[in-house]
Image (spheres, grey):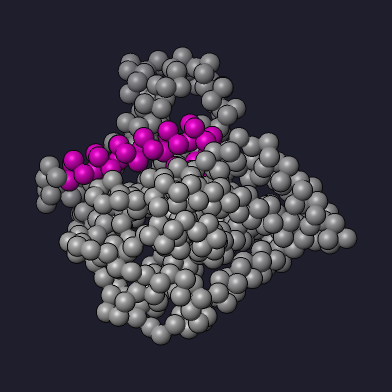
Amino acid sequence: MTLAVARSSLTTSLARYSRSWGLWLLLLVAPIAARYMIPHGEGADAGIVIAIGRQLPVMTSAFLGVSLGIVVSTLLLPIGWMYLRSNTNRRQPWQVEEVTAASRVAIALGRFAADAAVLLAMLAALTIAGWILGLIIGPADGWQPGAIALALWLVAAPALLGLAALRILFDALPPTRGGFGDFLYFVTWMTSIVAPALSEGEAPSFAGAMRDFPGFLRPLQFGAPAGAQDFAIGGVDDLLPGHVALDVMAGLFSPGYVESRLAWAGIAVLVAAFAGLVYRPHRASRGRRLTGRWSRLLSAGPPPAADPAAPAAKRIAVPALGLILAEARLILAGRLFKLLALAAFVFAALGEFRHAASPAALLLLIFALTAHAGRCEARGLVALTATAPLSPWARRGAFVLAGTGLTLLLALPAIPRGGAEVLVLAAGTGLVASLVAIAGAAVSGSGFAPRLLLFIAWYAYLSS
């Protein structure tokens, strides 16, 4: 019975994936990313920079595979998360499933297997792209397709399985099914990239390799020459001339590394099974929905009673201005957003703006903008608003102006100290966030994809 449920969940999910045009776009992302991100020369156009001891490594077949794995960790993991959370399988018949006797663990494992199959298909496409790149680049040790594939799959496959497991776990719990789950994944992803640095310089061991969830630290460091084990990925200044020789295969087979990758794959399966055990229904019980002082305070309350004798509403003198104000009210809908906006407003008056108040206000607006953009760009609602006197494009323009205006409003207390710089910074960040939110929601039909893109941009803005 349990095996049949898991098989049914797997085949149904795979069938729905096969009918999704987004799957083919996902499979194209990997080769395109490999073409533009893999280091293939010198200078600004050489792809992402991977430096060991401030020198570029010699391009070997194994190092090419590890470089492709770094592409997975830095780019394809968030793209894969966006796809899993916004594809055709995001809508499940929970009204039927939650009242049946089928095992939730079996259902979760079946969906996990389907997600893993899709992500591993993307990895297979990336492997083929790596083989083609190897023929073009010409590694120093010759074209070795086995070394490219081994390095890539050892580094990236467990990370992709972990991504699929996290998706199943977050979809199982009500608090992480929405925007908070996307933010929590963003924090988890950034932590997984930073955590391997804690093992820098340690003797190779299974425990140290387990801290390297992305899997690229050990192959880069273990085979490096003595005294040249510090590494950097991305923007590297003052590179030294020459290249450093890495024994990447020695790093792949160093003590505890292969075991740690297998352990992460096993943990992913256990997390998916655990998601089935802790699954909670979509509809909470009505017993404690609005109990408590804070719940009543943050609740919008019942709508005002209708007045049949009220006069007809007058036509607004400037319809465009009314549309902008309406979009601003909808962006900050609910008492909670208004209270948080008030806190950000006060923080701008007290704290440093560029690295404190501005990121705090922007993080709040990321949630507010993407939530409203996802609501107003739903497929059925877009067709309905097309019949309104103002076109959907006018509404989208008003959304951008309202989002930019709200960012400027939250920055007002910092203007006496920062002057024009604060105005330019607030207007620029608000404009970009609003454009990304409405454009991403218009393309994807939901607020999820732009939310994750804005989280990544927000982290870059905070750390710059």
- Residue at 64 percent across and 71 percent down: it is 266
Q: Is residue 100 left or right of residue 127?
A: right
In front: 40, or 397? 40
- Residue at 56 percent across and 22 percent down: it is 383
- Residue at 60 percent across and 54 percent down: it is 120
Q: Is residue 25 left or right of residue 64?
A: right
Q: How many marks?
A: 0
The stretch in magenta equals: 422-451
Residue 302 in percent (x, y) is at 56, 41
Query: Of helix, strand and loop, which mostly describes the magenta segment?
Result: helix
- Residue at 60 percent across and 57 percent down: it is 164
> Where 56 sits versus 36, above or below?
below
In front: 46, or 330? 46
Q: Quadrant of the C terminus?
A: bottom left
Q: Is residue 339 left or right of residue 179?
A: left
**Quick check: can you spot residue 54?**
yes
Based on the picture, tell me whether residue 425 belongs to the magenta stretch: yes
Residue 437 in percent (x, y) is at 41, 38
Quadrant location of residue 203?
A: bottom left
**Quick check: can you spot residue 171?**
no
Q: Residue furthest right?
A: 1
Q: Residue furthest front?
A: 142
Based on the picture, tell me whether residue 433 belongs to the magenta stretch: yes
Residue 125 in percent (x, y) is at 56, 47
> Where 179 sits versus 191, above or below?
above
Q: Quadrant of the N terminus?
A: bottom right
